[in-house]
Amino acid sequence: MCGRYATTTDPGRLAAELDAIDETPTDSGGSPNYNVAPTTQVLTVVERHEHDHPDDDPKLRIRRMRWGLIPVWTKAAEPGVPVKGKPLFNARADKAATTPSFRDAVKYRRCLVPMDGWYEWLVEPDAGAKGKVAKHPYFMSNADGSRLYMAGLWSVWRDRSQGASEPLLSCTILTTDAVGELTRIHDRMPLPMPQQHWAAWLDPDHPAPATLLETPSVESVAGIVARPVSTLVNSVRNNGPELLAPLDTRAGTEKAGQISLL
C-alpha cells in the first residue's frame, strides 16, 4: 500500500537533472507537496517518441498525471469527464500484467514516480484502550536524502464521443512485498526502480523484463530508513515541512521513541 507520499522537487529542476523535456503545463506550479494523496496531479517520468517524428530516438519527458489510473475503456459520466470509480492509485506488481485495468499499461505505458519518500502507518494494540488499535505514521526515505523513483504505470483516457477531446493522463504506483526492516511497518511497499533499470523499464518500444516486477532484494533497499512522524499527516489539509520533522524535534506533540526502527 502506498497512499501518501512527499515530493519537494519542481518539474523544471527534475527535467534539468535528468536531461528530460519538461512537458508540464506552465501554470501547473512547482510547489513542494508534503502530503500527496490520490487524485492529485503528480510528476512522472516517461520515455516517448516525438508525436510527429516516431522514427526518432525516444526522449525522457516530465509529465503531470492524475494519481489514480483511469483505464482507457472507462465510460464518460458527462462530456469529457470519466465515470468515478475505485481510485486505482496502487497496482500489485505481481498481478498487474494479468489485471484488466493494468495489463495494457504494463506492455506499453510504464513510468517512474519521483518522490522524497512515502508514508505508512504501523498498526498495533492501543495500550490505553483495550481491544482497540493505534496507528502510528512513519516516513520512509533514503538515509542520504536522495530522491526515490518508484515504478509506475500510466494511461491516456479520452471521451471518444467528443471527437478530438483533450486527453486525461493518469498513473498508478506499483507495489510489492515489503522486505528487510520495512516489514516491521507494513507488509507492502512501493516498488523502487534503480537507475540502472530505467532504460529497460521506460522503453516505449519493448516490454520490460518480467524480473523488474519482482520483489526487490533486501540489499537493494538497505538505504531506505523509516522514522516516526506526526499524525498531522493523517489529514490531507495539512501540507508543510513539519510533516517530515522527527517527533523529538517538536515539543508538545507525540513522544518520540514509542515505536522505532532506529
Image (cartoon, rainbow, N blue to C red):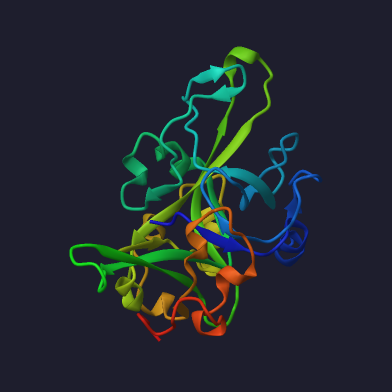
Q: Is residue 249 visible?
A: yes
Nearer to me, 33 or 214? 33
Residue lying at the far right of the rendered structure: 26
Q: For this view, does 202 lie left or right of residue 85?
A: right
Image quadrant assignment for residue 123: bottom left
Quarter of the figure that contains the C terminus: bottom left
Q: Is residue 245 above or below residue 215?
A: below
Figure quadrant of the N terminus: bottom left
Count of labels shown? 0
Please give the name of the residue rendered at 67% of the width and 21% of the height, measured from the top-left corner.
165
- Front residue of this view, candidates 205 and 128: 128
Instruction: Give the quadrant of residue 180.
Output: bottom left
- Residue 58 appears anywhere in the view: no
| Residue at image point 59% right, 58% down | 238
Whether residue 2 is situated above or below residue 76 in the rendered picture = below
Q: Position of residue 94 (x, y in %)?
A: 31, 52
What is the x, y in percent for residue 129? 24, 67
* Left or right, residue 15 beside residue 204: right
Between residues 212 and 160, which one lies in front from this camera angle? Answer: 160
x and y, in percent, of residue 253 in the image: 50, 76
Depth check: 216 or 27 in front? 27
Tell me if 57 is positioned left or right of 121 in this view.
Answer: right
- Residue 170 lies, in percent from the top left, at 56, 40
